[in-house]
Image (spheres, grey):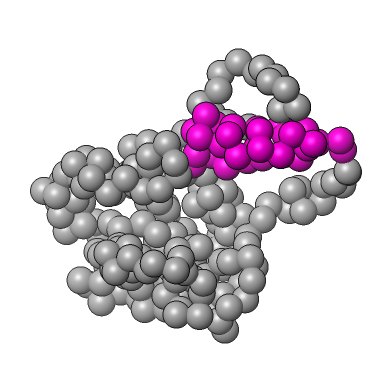
């Protein structure tokens, strides 16, 4: 059996999840990997068979998807070329982590696709949404990377096809300890946007981790 695994390069979650899933898949089948995107900085230990520009989601400094910048950076001709040139029919099925090239190539060729992603949890109306639901965002979540079925990841099991987050074994085996501070890891946000919120609670010592801050510094209880 041959499986094509499509991985969205944007962010850290998709690649981190692949590091757990790939060894399991390779016990069952021959697996080739396609990774798409142009703004990822994590790597895989496994060889990558295909790369594609795909569609990389761009975020603003407040942690929201910047749809204008995302759309501006899409290369539609290149995207279509990658979709149509991918030999997806050489595979029995596709495993897809919110990756559009493998998803649409499989869709047009009738190859079965299983989505494994956090985004897939929003295929269920039972998954919580903001009070003001964006129809555009709903459409993106549903059609960005179509699939026949899904195994979604979320912190709570809002629906039957939603499972707990996939976490690396050595992370699960760590021994957490209570310290005198609260760790903040919100990488989609610029730390300058976060500071006013945490300064409003001065009785707590906050340790903020951010790729936007190259040199560590302290300010008050922070």
Up/down of 148 relative to 57, above or below: below
Up/down of 41 relative to 18, above or below: above
- Front residue (pair 159, 86): 159
Magenta range is 179-208
Would you say residue 96 sits in the magenta stretch? no
- Front residue (pair 124, 7): 124
- Front residue (pair 156, 26): 156
Residue displayed at 25% across by 41% down: 69
Up/down of 108 relative to 9, above or below: below
> In this orientation, does residue 106 appear?
no
Q: Position of residue 151 (x, y in %)?
A: 52, 73
Up/down of 120 relative to 45, above or below: below
Which residue is the extreme one toward the left?
A: 77
Residue displayed at 68% across by 20% down: 219
Locate residue 148 relative to residue 128 in the image: left or right.
Answer: left
Q: Position of residue 142 (x, y in %)?
A: 33, 70
- The image shows a total of numbered marks equal to 0
Residue displayed at 46% across by 79% down: 124
Which residue is the extreme one toward the bottom?
A: 160
> In this orientation, does residue 142 appear?
yes
Would you say residue 199 sits in the magenta stretch? yes
In which quadrant will I find the N terminus? bottom left
| Residue 80, quarter of the rendered image | bottom left
Q: Where is residue 153 in the image (x, y as percent from the top left)?
A: 56, 66
Residue displayed at 33% across by 37% down: 38
Locate residue 61 relative to residue 118 in the image: left or right.
Answer: left
């Amino acid at each position: 059996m041959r499986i094509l695994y499509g991985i969205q390069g944007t962010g850290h979650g998709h690649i981190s999840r692949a590091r757990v899933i790939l060894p399991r898949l390779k016990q069952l089948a021959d697996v080739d990997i396609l990774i798409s995107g142009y703004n990822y900085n994590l790597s895989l230990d496994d060889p990558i068979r295909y790369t594609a520009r795909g569609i990389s989601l761009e975020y603003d400094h407040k942690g929201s998807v910047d749809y204008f910048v995302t759309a501006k950076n899409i290369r539609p001709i290149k995207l279509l070329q990658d979709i149509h040139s991918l030999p997806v029919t050489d595979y029995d099925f596709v495993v897809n982590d919110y990756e559009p090239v493998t998803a649409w190539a499989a869709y047009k060729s009738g190859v079965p696709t299983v989505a494994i992603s956090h985004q897939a949890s929003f295929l269920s109306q039972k998954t919580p949404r903001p009070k003001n639901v964006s129809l555009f965002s709903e459409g993106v979540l549903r059609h960005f990377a179509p699939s026949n079925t899904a195994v979604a990841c979320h912190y709570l099991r809002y629906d039957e096809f939603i499972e707990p987050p996939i976490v690396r074994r050595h992370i699960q085996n760590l021994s957490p300890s209570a310290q005198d501070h609260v760790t903040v890891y919100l990488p989609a946000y610029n730390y300058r946007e976060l500071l006013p919120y945490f300064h409003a609670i001065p009785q707590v010592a906050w340790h903020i981790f951010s790729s936007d801050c190259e040199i560590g510094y302290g300010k008050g209880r922070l």
